[in-house]
Image (cartoon, rainbow, N blue to C red):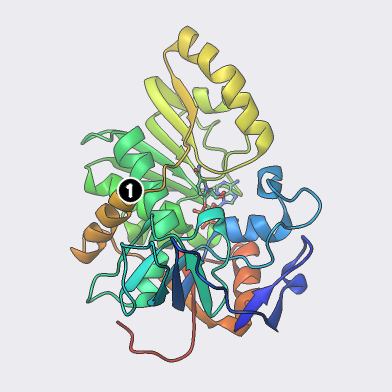
Amino acid sequence: MKAIVYHNYGSPDVLKLEEVNTPTPADDEILIKIHAVSVNRSDWEGLTGKPLYARMGGLLKPNYPILGSDIAGRVEMAGSNNRQFQPGDKVFGEMSGYQGGFAEYACATGRILALKPANMTFEVASAIPQAGVIALQGIRDKGQVQPGQKVLINGAGGGAGMFAVQLAKLYGAEVTGVDNTEKLDFMRSLGADHVIDYTREDFTRNGKQHDLILDLVAYRSAFAYQRALKPNGSYFAAGGSVATFVQILLLGPWIRRTTGKNIRLLVVQRNRKDLVAITELCEAGKVVPVIDRQYPLSEVPKALRYLGEGHVKGKVVITLESHNKT
Ligand SMILES: NC(=O)c1ccc[n+]([C@@H]2O[C@H](COP(=O)([O-])OP(=O)(O)OC[C@H]3O[C@@H](n4cnc5c(N)ncnc54)[C@H](OP(=O)(O)O)[C@@H]3O)[C@@H](O)[C@H]2O)c1
């Protein structure tokens, strides 16, 4: 099969389209013919090896040569112990370990995959899993957003941010989106009531305070975040630097005790129930997964460069060969 392969951390230039062996499913796995795979920030992090957590399992070199985690496709073969899916089923979801998706075929246990809704295209289905579940768990579960609350989403113009803005609006919040200059109109189009250009304004220094901050790009100090929270407000970091994560782990409990402000990491629990829940909101038209651009498999490097250069509004999707869209 064809796959986009890399053997060293680096820029998109280290990615090559190669012929590799088609994987064989273990007894508890299924083999999926991939029709679409979306691009996530986690792919960029796995490519560049930054932040440091992206090197878990491969400090000097990547531990697996194929990136790509959010797939949608058709089951080709099921291992003898796999009772969840049958050949021919159309499935979608996140691959474990954020790997294996930039290829024509992939094997997965199917534990966190789900059946693709019949009327949803493979492209749209592939845009939902990782970003949608981060947003759902950040806004609905951890954030417990209530009508009228002030919610700030840092990184609101990207994948998880796109879902988070729409979910926070759905739950009745007043939403501030923070992202780069190019994405201000996009955040407004998602429903953000206020937008901040991070290249011009630091939301932790503008005197405004929020009930909830969902941070997809946490690079500041824990003290800066507590400044931007209302009393009893909550802050959750989903992505960012290891230095900030360590600080949140060490100082979060002390800040909670002394100020009542809740500063924590969001550790996403991947599961089928939440994937189905966010997908049902998409099917109902309450949340719209926005696909900025689509590329063929051979152009994964171009797609990742587009993301790395800061242009993607919402999601970018890789489409494999021509297929019936649903
Ligand atoms: N916590 C967990 O369990 C878990 C699970 C899976 C993934 N993650 C992580 O979650 C993170 C979010 O991913 P995503 O897919 O939403 O990423 P994304 O699509 O790249 O979105 C991030 C957005 O933040 C913007 N941004 C960059 N620097 C910023 C800054 N200083 N201030 C405000 N916005 C800034 C980016 O814009 P530019 O284009 O300007 O860079 C981009 O629009 C990733 O780091 C991923 O690894 C966490």
Q: Residue furthest front?
A: 80
Give left or right: position of 141 versus 38: left
Residue 278: % across, % down: 29, 55
Q: Is residue 205 above or below residue 178?
A: above
Mark 1 neighbour density, 10 Å: few (under 14) some (14–19) many (20 or more)? some
Residue 213's quadrant in the figure? top left
Task: Say which element carries label 1.
Answer: loop
- Residue at 37% in and 63% down: 82
Residue on which disc 1 sits: 193
Compared with 140, 22 (above or below) is: below
Q: Nearer the viewer, residue 140 or 165?
A: 140
Total labels: the figure holds 1
Where does the image place residue 154, in percent across and percent down from the top left? 49, 44
Give percent across and percent down for residue 261.
43, 18
Q: Nearer the viewer, residue 257 or 182?
A: 257
Give me the residue at 51% from left, 45% from top: 216
Res 46 → quadrant: bottom right
Q: Is residue 8 left or right of residue 132?
A: right
